[in-house]
């Protein structure tokens, strides 16, 4: 174990295992209440999966939306989330996320000085469901200079390697080919961070200011109990850290334990983009003392490609977003046919990759490929590849669609027919087969400056043609330890285990199989971390200034039909 901050000790009030956003929110909340806290990180870098995420928070009925005059209510959000979760979300967790999300948001802003950008036009992921809103429920971290705030500690924070820009800037700049890359390089050189990296560094700064100790290379392997109460954590190597009040397990998912993932998940996971240290340590520690587990079939699914990116020396997947959502590309299955709305949210699209062809005892839609042409490459580029550069190994290139079909192993007549039909309708801004471009979410991720009527749709025009393989991936698993609505771990009989809390991807998701919108991972996780921190400190969720007025306003908004 290597201490980064704080005075080494064998005993603290609160021992937090893991260093992602939910862990840091717990630590800062407890420290704010006067508790001594240590954060133990298994790897050499702080931040966990949160640090390589988009950093957004999905918080329904938040005070930013109210200030902007956007109609929302907890009731409408509840209708929407329950529909997204297909009725499988556990009410106690769902209610905690919805009812206390804005309380958490106010707390981290007002007390911890975490700063966000309000995205008033970022649509929910399922605009076809009751209670959905076309903006106002998502916030993202502001740009943040980690070097100025953290000093030498900044070098111990995990990053995904992307240059720092916000989603708000993405909207303004459009295609990656139009980004001011020189300016972004300078930002990075100056220590400026964005997205999940910025969120984590802001939370880290808040923790350090409140005296939280941090240690890396500190893998927890076993919970220590005195009688029936959890009183500490045994580390790999035998050292024990004692907790006077509570242990928080926030160790991330189990996706990198391949055998465990294969045995628990509902579908085969082919790649991930999370840190390889996510091997289910918290889940295993909790199971050893009889915790209940729930929701382990699920993950934050996403279509990904293998492009050679490494994380901690291990190959990770690259999320496909504009590559499949921009006008002028399509996705085809093993039969050379389109099989889904390519522009829909990544969680639902990935589920299409999981379909099974029972008569032939094989996957129905995979292998799958994004197919695009030279005009698309010239307008937008693909991943970090640009027109005029040597074609990277992860792309298949051919002069004609017939040749491309042969190279990716699909029937040429099917691919030709799929492109011809798509082109015919895309030119007039329609997709009668899969309704791509009809929802506000689809159009948000399109190109408003494209020369066709619908920003999500455009024809493939001329060769060379390219294909990029798509596999079933995930940001991380999102099932595991069962907790109550305050983050207290439950045993197999549903009773809280004294002294033990959990949050984040190590636990059952508040939204079960659902993915309501951008930030629906971090929003409820940080909320649970906040609630756990307050509970450990013996406090109720804080009532921030103006909350009563907000409650009255929420009641008035709730009367508006969803």
Image (cartoon, grey):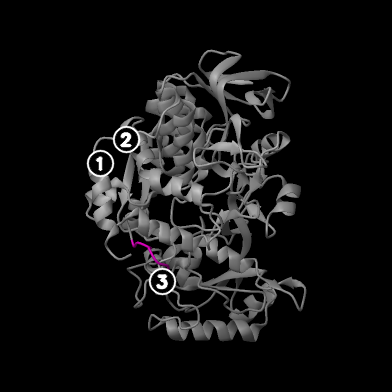
Residue neighbourhood size for the residue with mark 1, other residues' Cα within 10 Å, grouped as few (<14), some (14–19), many (≥20): few
First of labels 2, 1 by sequence position: 2
Q: Is residue 152 visible?
A: yes
Question: Is 240 part of what is drawn in magenta?
Answer: no
First of labels 1, 3 by sequence position: 3
Q: Are marks 2 and 1 in contact (CB under 8 Å)?
A: yes
Residue drawn at point x = 32 percent, y = 35 percent: 543
- Separation (CA) of disc 1 from disc 3: 42 Å
User: SS at mark 2?
Assistant: loop
User: SS at mark 1?
Assistant: helix
Q: Which numbered mark, 1 or 3, is in the foreground of this view?
A: 1
Give the labeled residue for mark 3: 456
Residue 489, placed above or below residue 399? above
User: SS at mark 3?
Assistant: loop
Q: Which residues are magenta?
A: 128-134
Give the labeled residue for mark 2: 543
First of labels 3, 2 by sequence position: 3
Q: Nearer the viewer, residue 278 or 405?
A: 278
């Amino acid at each position: 174990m290597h201490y980064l901050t704080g005075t080494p000790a064998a005993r603290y009030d609160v021992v937090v295992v893991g260093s992602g956003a939910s862990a840091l929110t717990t630590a800062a909340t407890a420290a704010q209440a006067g508790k001594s806290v240590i954060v133990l990180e298994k790897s050499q870098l702080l931040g966990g999966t949160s640090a390589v995420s988009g950093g957004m928070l999905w918080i329904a009925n938040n005070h930013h939306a109210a200030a902007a005059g956007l109609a929302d209510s907890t009731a409408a959000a509840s209708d929407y989330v329950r529909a997204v979760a297909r009725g499988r979300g556990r009410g106690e967790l769902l209610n905690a996320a919805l009812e206390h999300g804005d309380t958490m948001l106010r707390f981290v802003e007002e007390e911890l000085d975490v700063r966000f950008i309000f995205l008033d036009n970022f649509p929910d992921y399922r605009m076809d469901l009751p209670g959905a809103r076309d903006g106002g429920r998502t916030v993202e971290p502001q740009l943040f200079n980690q070097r100025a705030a953290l000093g030498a500690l900044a070098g111990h924070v995990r990053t995904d390697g992307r240059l720092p820009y916000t989603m708000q800037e993405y909207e303004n700049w459009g295609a990656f080919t139009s980004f001011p890359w020189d300016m972004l390089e300078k930002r990075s050189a100056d220590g400026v961070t964005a997205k999940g990296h910025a969120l984590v560094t802001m939370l880290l700064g808040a923790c350090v200011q409140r005296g939280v100790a941090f240690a890396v290379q500190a893998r927890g392997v076993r919970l220590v109990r005195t009688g029936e109460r959890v009183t500490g954590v045994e580390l790999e190597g035998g050292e024990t850290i004692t907790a006077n009040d509570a242990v928080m397990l926030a160790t991330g998912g189990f996706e990198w334990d391949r055998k465990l993932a294969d045995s628990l998940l509902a579908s085969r996971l082919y790649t991930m983009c999370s840190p390889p240290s996510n091997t289910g340590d918290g889940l295993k520690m909790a199971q050893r003392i009889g915790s209940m587990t729930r929701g382990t079939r699920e993950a934050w699914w996403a279509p990904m490609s293998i492009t050679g990116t490494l994380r901690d020396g291990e190959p990770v997947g690259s999320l496909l977003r504009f590559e499949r959502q921009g006008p002028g590309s399509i996705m085809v299955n093993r039969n050379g046919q389109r099989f889904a709305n390519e522009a829909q949210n990544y969680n639902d699209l990935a589920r299409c990759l999981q379909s099974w062809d029972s008569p032939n005892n094989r996957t129905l839609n995979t292998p799958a490929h994004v197919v695009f042409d030279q005009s698309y490459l010239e307008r937008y580029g693909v991943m970090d590849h640009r027109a005029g550069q040597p074609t990277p190994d992860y792309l298949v290139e051919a002069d004609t669609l017939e040749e491309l079909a042969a190279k990716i192993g699909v029937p040429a007549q099917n691919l030709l027919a799929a492109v011809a039909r798509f082109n015919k309708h895309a030119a007039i801004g329609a997709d009668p087969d899969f309704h791509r471009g009809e929802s506000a979410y689809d159009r948000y991720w399109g190109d408003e400056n494209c020369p066709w009527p619908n920003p999500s749709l455009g024809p493939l025009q001329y060769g060379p043609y390219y294909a990029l393989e798509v596999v079933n991936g995930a940001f991380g698993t999102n099932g595991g330890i069962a907790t109550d609505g305050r983050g207290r771990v439950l045993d197999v009989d549903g009773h809280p285990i004294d002294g033990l809390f959990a949050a984040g991807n190590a636990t059952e998701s508040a939204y079960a199989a659902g993915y309501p919108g951008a930030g629906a991972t971090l929003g409820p996780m940080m909320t649970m971390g906040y609630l756990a921190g307050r509970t450990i400190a013996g406090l109720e969720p804080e009532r921030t200034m103006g909350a009563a007025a907000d409650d009255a306003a929420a009641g008035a908004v709730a009367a508006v039909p969803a």
